[in-house]
Image (spheres, rainbow, N blue to C red):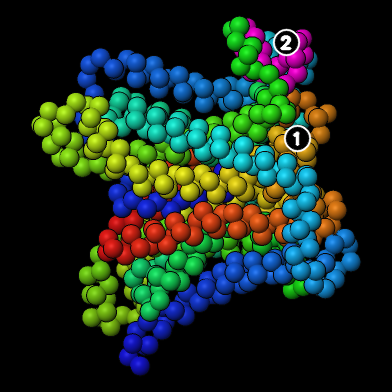
C-alpha cells in the first residue's frame, strides 16, 4: 500500500499518454490490420472479412512489384551514400579544424528544410530535358564535358531511384555526420595515446582502436536511415508526383485511398510497410534498452 | 525533415569541443575537401535564391545558373499571394501542437526518470516504438476514428495527431535530460515530504529550460515540415498547411520557376530562422538519444 502511494501518482500522471499511445499506436495498428483483411473496397463501407485475399492480390500486382523494386533501389543507394558521406565528413572534422562550427552548420542545415521545399529545387536540378532545353545539373555537366554524369536522372528506367535518393542524401548526410562525430569524440583519448606509445601508426590507431568503437554508431545510423527510407513519401511526391516511374509503396497506398478508395488494399500496403520497419527496429530497440540497463 | 528520429545507443554525450588541432601535411587537403562538400550542399540554396529574384523572362534554361540581370521581387510577391493563408494555417497548427507536446513530454519524462513506477521501462519501450512506425499504418483508422468521434475538422485534428504522435520523441528528450538531474535533489524533496507535483513544479521544472528548447525546436520543425499527416487529414484546401499548399501549386507545372523557388524559400523561412538562431539546440534535438546522462 505504501508502495502504491509512492508511485501511484506518477502512473496516474503518465496514464493519459499511455492510453493515447495504446489507442493511437497499437490500437490503430490492429484496426488497420483488420481493414487490410476486410473487403472494404470502393466507396461503400463494408466490414466483411476477405481474409488474405488482398495480400494475395498485392503479391500478384505487377505495379506493387515495381514499387518494391523501386524502394529497394532507393534504400540501398540512400543508406550506402549517407553512411559513407557522413562517416567521411565526421572523419574530416573529428580532430578539430578551424571553422568546425561553420562547416557543421552547413552540413546540417538541409535537415531544417522540408522534403516538399527541397523537392522543388531538386526537381529543377535533376531536370532530364536534353539538348537546348537542358537545365539544372545537366547544363553544368555539359559545360564541364562530363555529360556522362548527367542524363535522365530519376526518370531513368534502370537507375532512376538512385537519382531519386540524391535529395535525401543531401538532406541527411549531415545528420549521419553528427552521429559519427559524437562517436569519434567518444573514443577515450587515452586509448589512442596508448596505441601511439606502442608505436602504432595513425592508420593502425584508426583501424584497431577508433573504428571498433564506432560500430554502435554505424548500427544506429543504419537503423535510423533504413526506417526513414522504407517509409519515404514526401520526397517522392514532391519530385515525381504520382508517376509510376518513381512510385514507391507509400505513394501507391496514398493513390489507392485517394483516387480509388480501395481501403483494404491501402491498409494492406501500410501493414507491409510496418512489418518491414518492425523487422528492422524491434530487435534494435530491445538491444538498446538492454544496453542501457547494463550500463545503469 | 518530417520523419527523422533518433535513438542513439551510445552512452557518449555529444561532445563538440575538439581535443587538439591537427598540424601539418594533410591539413590543406582536408580544408579543400570540407569546402568542396560545403559548396555542394549549398548549391541548391544558390539556385533557390537567384531564381527566386529573377524576372519571369529569365527563368528559362539558358539563364539557369547565372545571376539575375535585373533583380525583382515579383516571384516572392506571387508566392506570397499564393501561400500567405496556408502559412497562417501552419502557424495555427504548429504553435499549439508544439506547446501541448512539450507539456506532455515534460510530465512523462519526469515520471519515467524521477518518479518511476513498476514497469516504467516497459512502458517507455512501448512508447519508443511509436517513434519508428510508418504513420501510414495508422492513417486509415485514425481518420475513421476522427470521423466517428465527430471531432471538429481541419486544423484541430491535425494538432491532435501531431501531439499524440509527438509523445514518444518529446518523452525521450525530457526523460534523457531529467536523468542528468541528481537523484539526491529528489530525495531531499521526499524528505521534506513534498508530493510529486510539488517536486516537479519547484525542483524539476525550473531546471527544464534547455530540454524545453530542444523539444520545442524538434516539434516545431517536424510539424512545420510535415506533409503526410496534413495531406491525409486536411481535406479542405483553405485549411492546408504550407507544405501541402506548396506541393499543390508547384505540382502543376504551369507555375513559373521564380515563383516556385520563392515559394520553397518562403515555406522554409520559419524553420531556417529557428535553425540559424538556435542551431546548437537543434543539433541536440536531433541527437535526442545521446542527451542521456
* Image side of residue B102 versus residue B26, left or right: right
Locate residue A147, reporting x and y percent. 64, 11
State which chain disc 1 sits on.
Answer: A
Specify whether residue A135 is painted magenta: yes
Q: Is mark 1 on a helix, strand or loop?
A: helix
Q: Distance between the residues labelled 2 and 1?
A: 28 Å
Work out which residue is located at the far bottom of the displayed protein and give it: A1
Q: State the mark number for residue A245.
A: 1
**Front residue of this view, candidates B256 and A262:** A262
Can you give x and y, in whole percent of width and height, for residue B135 in the image?
63, 57
**Label 2 close to label 1 by CB (< 8 Å):** no
Of badges 2 and 1, nearer the viewer stands 1
Which residue is at the front of the view, A89 or B239? Answer: A89
Q: Can residue A72 be seen in this view?
A: yes
Part of the protein shown in magenta:
A127-143
Label 2: which residue?
Answer: B62
Q: In this view, does B171 lie above or below A151?
A: below
Q: Disc 2 is attached to a residue of which chain?
A: B
Q: Residue placed at 66% from the left, 56% from the top?
A: A272
Q: Quadrant of residue A134?
A: top right
Q: Residue at x 75, y 10 (%)?
A: A131
Quadrant in which the C terminus of chain B appears: bottom left
- Where does the N terminus of chain B fall, quadrant-wise? top right
**Magenta highlight on residue B39:** no
Amino acid at each position: 500500500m505504501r508502495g502504491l502511494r509512492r508511485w501511484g501518482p506518477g502512473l496516474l500522471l503518465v496514464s493519459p499518454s499511455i492510453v493515447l499511445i495504446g489507442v493511437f499506436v497499437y490500437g490503430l495498428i490492429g484496426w488497420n490490420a483488420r481493414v487490410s483483411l476486410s473487403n472494404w473496397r470502393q466507396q461503400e463501407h463494408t466490414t466483411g472479412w476477405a481474409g488474405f485475399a488482398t495480400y494475395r492480390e498485392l503479391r500478384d500486382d505487377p505495379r506493387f512489384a515495381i514499387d518494391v523494386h523501386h524502394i529497394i533501389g532507393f534504400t540501398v543507394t540512400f543508406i550506402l551514400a549517407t553512411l559513407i558521406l557522413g562517416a567521411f565528413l565526421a572523419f574530416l572534422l573529428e580532430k578539430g579544424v578551424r571553422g568546425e562550427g561553420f562547416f557543421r552548420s552547413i552540413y546540417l542545415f538541409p535537415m531544417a528544410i522540408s522534403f516538399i521545399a527541397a523537392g522543388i529545387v531538386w526537381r529543377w536540378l535533376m531536370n532530364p530535358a536534353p539538348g537546348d532545353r537542358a537545365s539544372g545539373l545537366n547544363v553544368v555537366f555539359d559545360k564541364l564535358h562530363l555529360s556522362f554524369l548527367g542524363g535522365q536522372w530519376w526518370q531513368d528506367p534502370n537507375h532512376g531511384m538512385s537519382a531519386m535518393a540524391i535529395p535525401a542524401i543531401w538532406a541527411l548526410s549531415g545528420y549521419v555526420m553528427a552521429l559519427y562525430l559524437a562517436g569519434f569524440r567518444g573514443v577515450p583519448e587515452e586509448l589512442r595515446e596508448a596505441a601511439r606509445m606502442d608505436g602504432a601508426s595513425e592508420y593502425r590507431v584508426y583501424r584497431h582502436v577508433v573504428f571498433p568503437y564506432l560500430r554502435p554508431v554505424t548500427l544506429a545510423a543504419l537503423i535510423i536511415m533504413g526506417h526513414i527510407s522504407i517509409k519515404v513519401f514526401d520526397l517522392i511526391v514532391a519530385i515525381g508526383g504520382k508517376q509510376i516511374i518513381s512510385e514507391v509503396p507509400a505513394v501507391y497506398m496514398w493513390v489507392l485511398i485517394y483516387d480509388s478508395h480501395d481501403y483494404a488494399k491501402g491498409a494492406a500496403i501500410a501493414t507491409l510497410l510496418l512489418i518491414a520497419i518492425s523487422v528492422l527496429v524491434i530487435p534494435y530497440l530491445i538491444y538498446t534498452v538492454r544496453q542501457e540497463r547494463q550500463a545503469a | 525533415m518530417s520523419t527523422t528520429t533518433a535513438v542513439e545507443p551510445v552512452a557518449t554525450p555529444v561532445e563538440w569541443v575538439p581535443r587538439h588541432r591537427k598540424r601539418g601535411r594533410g591539413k590543406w587537403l582536408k580544408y579543400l575537401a570540407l569546402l568542396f562538400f560545403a559548396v555542394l550542399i549549398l548549391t541548391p540554396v544558390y539556385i533557390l535564391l537567384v531564381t527566386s529574384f529573377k524576372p519571369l523572362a529569365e527563368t528559362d534554361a539558358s539563364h539557369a545558373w547565372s545571376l539575375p540581370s535585373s533583380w525583382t521581387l515579383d516571384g516572392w510577391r506571387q508566392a506570397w499571394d499564393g501561400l500567405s493563408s496556408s502559412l497562417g494555417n501552419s502557424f495555427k497548427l504548429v504553435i499549439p501542437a508544439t506547446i501541448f507536446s512539450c507539456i506532455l513530454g515534460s510530465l512523462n519524462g519526469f515520471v519515467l526518470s524521477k518518479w518511476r513506477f513498476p514497469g516504467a521501462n516497459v512502458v517507455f519501450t512501448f512508447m519508443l516504438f511509436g517513434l519508428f512506425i510508418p504513420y501510414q499504418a495508422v492513417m486509415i483508422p485514425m481518420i475513421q476514428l476522427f470521423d466517428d468521434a465527430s471531432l471538429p475538422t481541419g486544423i484541430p485534428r491535425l494538432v491532435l495527431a501531431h501531439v499524440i504522435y509527438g509523445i514518444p520523441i518529446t518523452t525521450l528528450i525530457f526523460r534523457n535530460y531529467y536523468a542528468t538531474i541528481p537523484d539526491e535533489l529528489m530525495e531531499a524533496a521526499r524528505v521534506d515530504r513534498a508530493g510529486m507535483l510539488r517536486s516537479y513544479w519547484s525542483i524539476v521544472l525550473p531546471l527544464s529550460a534547455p530540454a524545453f528548447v530542444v523539444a520545442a525546436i524538434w516539434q516545431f520543425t517536424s510539424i512545420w515540415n510535415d506533409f503526410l499527416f496534413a495531406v491525409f487529414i486536411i481535406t479542405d484546401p483553405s485549411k492546408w498547411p504550407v507544405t501541402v499548399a506548396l506541393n499543390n501549386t508547384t505540382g502543376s507545372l504551369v507555375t513559373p520557376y521564380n515563383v516556385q523557388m520563392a515559394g520553397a524559400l518562403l515555406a522554409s523561412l520559419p524553420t531556417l530562422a529557428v535553425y540559424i538562431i538556435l542551431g546548437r539546440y537543434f543539433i541536440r534535438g536531433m541527437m535526442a538519444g545521446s542527451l542521456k546522462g
